[in-house]
């Protein structure tokens, strides 16, 4: 049995993650979590975005959420990034490690990682 203090700490930690996923920021990270995405490894990708956005102090600027099928199953896990007044960026074949890199370079640094995007397909 957990103590009341331990339960309160768990509640606070989880509430921060829920707020992060439901925020209304200028930047939205949307992870495809349909059956195909989950089978391809979207769960760890979603977790990496949530954890890294929090760790980088971007929670007030970036909302991380999930959606169903994006429609390009062969490229799962798929992540779309929507920024105000910019074109949507679609990252494909994402991994936990790539997600952390996207947070660092794209969300924090402002530079799209072209080789991870759908536009890199020839």
Image (cartoon, helix red, strand yellow):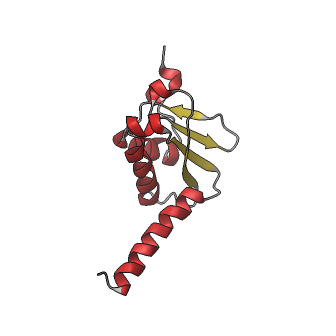
Residue 101 horizontal/vertical position (percent): 40, 42
95 shown above or below 118: below
Residue 68 horizontal/vertical position (percent): 56, 40
Q: Residue at x 41, y 56 (%)?
A: 51
Q: Residue at x 46, y 30 (%)?
A: 92
Is any part of residue 93 visible from this angle? yes
Quadrant occupied by the N terminus: bottom left
Exactly how many numbered labels are in the figure? 0
The answer to whether residue 99 is left or right of residue 66 is: left
Task: Pick out the residue farthest to the right.
Answer: 85
Residue 113 horizontal/vertical position (percent): 47, 33
Task: Pick out the residue farthest to the bottom.
Answer: 4
Dividing the picture into quadrants, the one containing residue 9 is bottom left
Residue 61 horizontal/vertical position (percent): 58, 56
The answer to whether residue 88 is left or right of residue 77 is: right
The answer to whether residue 81 is left or right of residue 17 is: right
Q: Residue at x 44, y 29 (%)?
A: 116
Is any part of residue 77 visible from this angle? no
Task: Work out whether residue 6 or residue 68 is closer to the camera in this orientation and state it.
Answer: 68
Task: Pick out the residue farthest to the top.
Answer: 122
Dividing the picture into quadrants, the one containing residue 84 is top right
């Amino acid at each position: 049995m957990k103590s009341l203090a331990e339960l309160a700490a768990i509640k606070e930690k989880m509430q921060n993650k829920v707020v992060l996923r439901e925020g209304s920021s200028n930047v939205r990270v949307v992870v495809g979590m349909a059956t195909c995405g989950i089978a391809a490894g979207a769960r760890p990708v979603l977790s990496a975005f949530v954890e890294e956005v929090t760790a980088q102090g971007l929670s007030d600027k970036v909302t991380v959420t999930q959606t169903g099928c994006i429609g390009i199953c062969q490229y799962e896990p798929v992540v779309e990034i929507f920024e105000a007044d910019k074109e949507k960026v679609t990252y494909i074949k994402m991994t936990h490690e790539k997600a952390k890199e996207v947070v660092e370079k794209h969300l924090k640094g402002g530079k799209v990682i072209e080789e991870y995007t759908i536009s890199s397909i020839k």
